[in-house]
Image: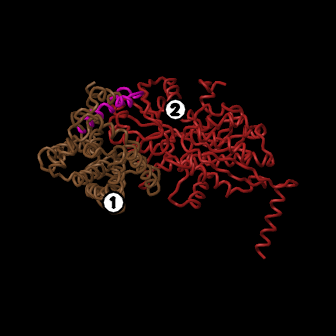
Amino acid sequence: MLNALISIIFDGLAYAMILFVISVGLSVTMGLMGFVNLAHGVFAMLGGYLLVTLMQHGGLGFIPALLLAAVLIALFSLLFERFLYAPLYRASELDQVLLSIGLVLMATAAMTYLFGPSPVAVQVPDYLSGQWTLGGRVFPVYRVLMIAFGFVLALVLWLALERTLLGARIRAAVDNRRMAEAVGINVDRLFQLTFALGSGLAALGGGLAVEILGLSPTFASQYLVLFLIVVAVGGMGTIKGSFLAALLLGVIDNGGKYLWPEGGAFFIYLVTVAVLLFKPGGLFGARAA
Amino acid sequence: MRALLFSALAVSLSLGVATGAVAKTVKVGVVMTYSGGAAEFGQQIDRGMDLYLKLHPEAFGGHEVELIKRDAKSPGGDVAKTAVQELITRERVQLLAGFVFSPNAMASAPLATQGKVPMIIMNAGTAWIPSLSPNIARVSFSMWHAAHPMGLYAKEKLGCSTAAVGYTDYPPGKDSLEAFTLGFEGAGGTVIDAIPMGSPREVPDFTPFFQRVKDAKPDCFYVFVPAGNHAAAMVKTYGDLAMRDAGIKLIGPGDVIQDTKLQAMGNEAVGMIVMGHYAADLDNAENDAFVKAWQEAYGADSTPDFMAVSGWDGMAAIAHVIKTLDGDIDADSAMQVLRGWTFNSPRGPIQIDPETRDIIHNMYVEEVVSKDGRLGVQVLDTLEQVKDPCKALQIGKCAK
């Protein structure tokens, strides 16, 4: 029983961290601009493919390739923002959904063309593979470090949002955009910055996910629902919310599959419905949806 | 001059073969998955068929074969059925062949009956598919071919008294689970857990399922997942969780270590034991020639696998039908000709069971080994001429 509990929590946490790293950017940008960006997972997918390419053809190590991929995708996403998203900021949500889902389909086709339909794998360095043994139990090193990294990242992001001027501006803009603009905050510029940051984080998460979830051209649509659930359950525009929602959903998803493989994948939706029934704005929503 | 001589020779040869008859063109409708994640399955079978056509034009009795290919896309059955309908009614094909996924073969079977078109199954492994239409013959395998003997073998030779089964949740997965359980428990073992592990469409994160098995500590862990990407991810999870060190043997049907995917599985696969009917490493004269011809045709890096062999053998079966019936194909005669047909396949001698129209072939107990820096297969044991145990034992839907 204890074994089962440790298994569920450990694997659930590792899964949760990937969800968190990818989703947190989506949460903040959606909270900030109310832009329905279903193509967020595309940046995660591009990050994964870029990581694999940089390692195979650029001869870079895992960590440098991961960081470079995140930075490049963050810059690349600014082009998206300027030329595709900006014209639709005042458009209806349906238009935004159509545009971004179209981008998902195009990205899937493009990746299939470039990399083929089969999943690609990443060769993680020796110091990240293998296992650590603790108290007679074996823990894969990669997942242990993944969990540690997730906690550190959450802390850094939280501090940045709560303790810096930039963070204060973002919070102000999420809470009340018009008032923030009235006091002289350039919300559009702020949004570009957070959008790039969020996309870079998605790319980072996508790169980290290759080893655990695998990577294929359908990644962006396959996990889209999960990213949206994290945002919906956590509440838009909050890092704490995304983090706790990712933890909750990651552990519940793993626990469900572990304890009841026949139907366990369903639990995550049950929890989502339950949370949204009682808190329609999410656990820590800045405003009611 | 030389060209003239050759064409004269060719003319007299073809005249000699098809004495008195006009060379006919036989239309064969091929329905396989050519797009999406499983596109390479279709490609492997295609290549096997093409290779046989190219190397053995004489086997068709002087007749021409026209392959009309259709993409069955997903494993859902609906697209395949539409394609088969179109092939029968508009293209007027005389034979149907292919069928990678079981649901596609099942959905199409009634059309083979109504349209009176013989249907050669080249992959789809759900046991009772040949029972769905009197016009079906299968050259590939039944899920039971691997799973049932593996159950017996795990208990009797591998010394496992408990086993857990992990399977992908779709018909061949359930088939494999049932067959393994019957074999294993029939020999006195106990299956302590059976875990459905997601759908065939997407490769899941296997960790929660495998962790559950690890905590339950069975002697053997029998895994059925679709050949290919599922299998690579599955073996990786087995390695990541250090399950071999925990004393849990990984076993499965042969398709888990499909030759085309074997190298990508990594060293975690070494030591896995499977029950299969083909591996590119099999040591026999037909296979040596087959692998050599394959690599000449498709590149030294490419390898045939059990699907390619089904394409090759399926084409040989089609050649046998066309030649024997002299190009006039009808379903009844085609099945008559195929019942009891024997052939020296790269997988060893094969036969179409005269009663069930299913394949009879050798099963090999194969261990994954590391040879010269690459992964290969070592045959530990051979079970000669195995009939589909599901029909032999009259289980469930196979009892007809």
Q: Colour of chain A?
A: brown
Residue pictured at 67% horizontal, 49% vertical: B315
Query: Where does the image place residue A114, in percent across and percent down from the top left?
Result: 44, 58
Is A223 in the magenta?
A: no
For badge 2, the amino acid type reads: Ser
Q: Nearer the viewer, residue B271 or B46?
A: B46
Query: Where does the image place residue A166, in percent across and percent down from the top left?
Result: 15, 50
Residue B68 against residue B357 in the figure, above or below: below
For badge 1, the amino acid type reads: Leu
- Marks 1 and 2, Cα distance to the nearest angstrom? 41 Å
Which residue is tagged 2?
A: B176
Q: Is residue B266 visible?
A: no
Is A268 in the magenta?
A: yes
Q: Is residue B339 visible?
A: yes
Tell me the subunit letter for badge 2: B
Q: Main secondary structure of the magenta part?
A: helix
Query: Magenta span covers which residues?
Result: A242-269
Q: Colour of chain B?
A: red
| Colour mode of the rendering | by chain
